[in-house]
Amino acid sequence: MANKKITKTYDEINARIKAGEAVVVTAEEMVGIVHQEGVEAAAARVDVVTTGTFAPMCSSGMFFNFGQMTPTIKASKVWLNKVAAYAGLAAVDAYIGVTEPAEDDPLNKIYPGEFRYGGGHVIENLLRGEKVLLEAKAYGTDCYAARKMKKEIGLDDLSYALLCNPRNGYQNYNCAVNLSDKTVYTYMGMLKANCRNANFCSAGELSPLLNDPLYKTIGVGTRIFLGGGYGYVTWKGTQHNPVVPRTKGGVPTKPAGTLMVQGDLKQMSADWLRGVSIQGYGNTMAIGLGVPIPILNAEMAEYTGVSDNDIVTQVIDYGHDYTNGIARSYGEVSYAQLKSGEIIVNGKKVQTVPLSSVVKAREIAENLKHQIKSGNFLLNKPAELLPDGA
Amino acid sequence: MFTQIYLLRFPKDTSDQPFVYRLVKEYDIEFNILKADILLQREGVMIIELKGSTKNNVKAGLDFLREMGIKVERLAARIRRDDEKCFQCGACTAVCSAGALYIKRPEMSVIFDVEKCTGCSLCVPLCPVRAMEVSLGDTWILSEEFTV
């Protein structure tokens, strides 16, 4: 056994899935399997490892077509429940981003702002079967005479609704502290003065890109769990940066790769796409994302066997450094340490606070595992892998 | 030291009584008024943090308040978590100094132990999906109507 090199193809794995014979485990389960059986044996036995993550992912939104009326309109400004959408696409097409707050929101005028409603909440409302108010303005043309439009719409009224996220699934992320002497409200949450909490936001060993650190299986066309339904990786996400320091196992030690993903919103669920308000910072959306990783060989078994002990990130100061563009690390910590509840920064014990839901990440990995086991989810071979910087 | 936040309701005829003075003077209780809405000849509401050297110390003060006809309730009893909304991220654990919101390991699930809650309400606007709710009356309200 020890000398036999395992190789499997996507077709072979899919054939086993269709036959109901595929061995599918979650990324958490894979840690123990690789540890106990070794990489070759694990690669021989396991066909697919499922990953998951559920956390606020800012770069997300919905492309939609809201249908014509008489006289027709070429909408140049569009709002859904007072949240502005980008209308510079076509006559009745627009994109609503999850970080867009409602136009009448007081923002940070009353500091720290509450940001009660934004683009993410609009999408969640639609998924819950609720109607939202669409308002549009236009300058009027000979072929599109109308100047304004106002109607209530539900998800069923939209002829097209595509969840399209130009950057999701960040491969690793900073651990945030605040070394200044006043509380700061950041996208990494509320950080108490003088380094009294350390916030982190990654599913660690369950996180998709940390289980395929060098993008050997994830690329254009990878079929994924997205927002409770399915979707696809459509290319690298914005800020995808494969050229970063890595551990011996290939895992980036700071934020690195990202995914651009999309899927038909109409088959998704509000349980896995949640509008979010981050105090003092703004709106965004928590997204459920899961990627199945085919165990094509021992190398993939080794990657997916990565544990929270093997994944590290940098402690970054959001009180002063981050906003001033200073790249400085106050130390390297592992996700095992972060999840333990306490880390040491500058020689002092600091409470750690997770922002990414491990409970939901695990649920996604389990969900994907059962879909694959029951033959309802096949693996796509990517048309092109994500750039690895080589 | 025993600290707890209380919701006090004053009937119309008690609002002119110097009860805080007597709490300090006779019961040796430290106080911190977080919110008060008290008008003459109207029912008044006050959210007050009381700190005493022992639990009995605070309890004696509360008994005195009740004797004066003031309705006393732990504010924590007015805080709840909507488990449908909560997605178990853990952001709230940063502000919960009472340890009522904490992470259960190794599952990494987020637990709300209402018994430990002091009612400070800092978690309410911090929760990304507003799963923590405070109610001062018959209906549950969200953070924006309640800023402590």
Image (cartoon, rainbow, N blue to C red):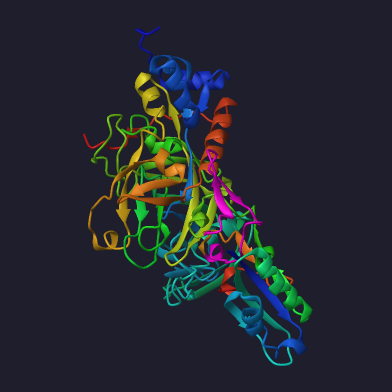
Vertical relation: A203 (above or below) B2: above
Relative horizontal placement of residue A288, taking residue B140 as reference (left or right): left
Relative horizontal placement of residue B42, taking residue B92 as reference (left or right): right
Vertical relation: A284 (above or below) A354: below
* Quadrant of the rendered image containing residue B140: bottom right
Check if residue A297 falls in the magenta segment: no
Measuring from the top left, give residue A227's x and y in whole percent: 53, 46
Does the rendering let one see residue B76?
Answer: yes
Frontmost residue, A173 versus B15:
B15
Kindly identify the residue that appears in the image at 60 percent across and 59 percent down.
B131
The magenta stretch is B96-125
Relative horizontal placement of residue A378, taking residue B11 as reference (left or right): left
Quarter of the figure that contains the C terminus of chain A: top left
Main SS, magenta region, reads loop
Check if residue B109 falls in the magenta segment: yes
Report the number of numbered marks: 0
Kindly identify the residue that appears in the image at 49 percent across and 69 percent down.
A114
Frontmost residue, A321 versus A133:
A321
* Quadrant of the rendered image containing residue A248: top left
Measuring from the top left, give residue A317's x and y in whole percent: 31, 57
Vertical relation: A17 (above or below) B41: above
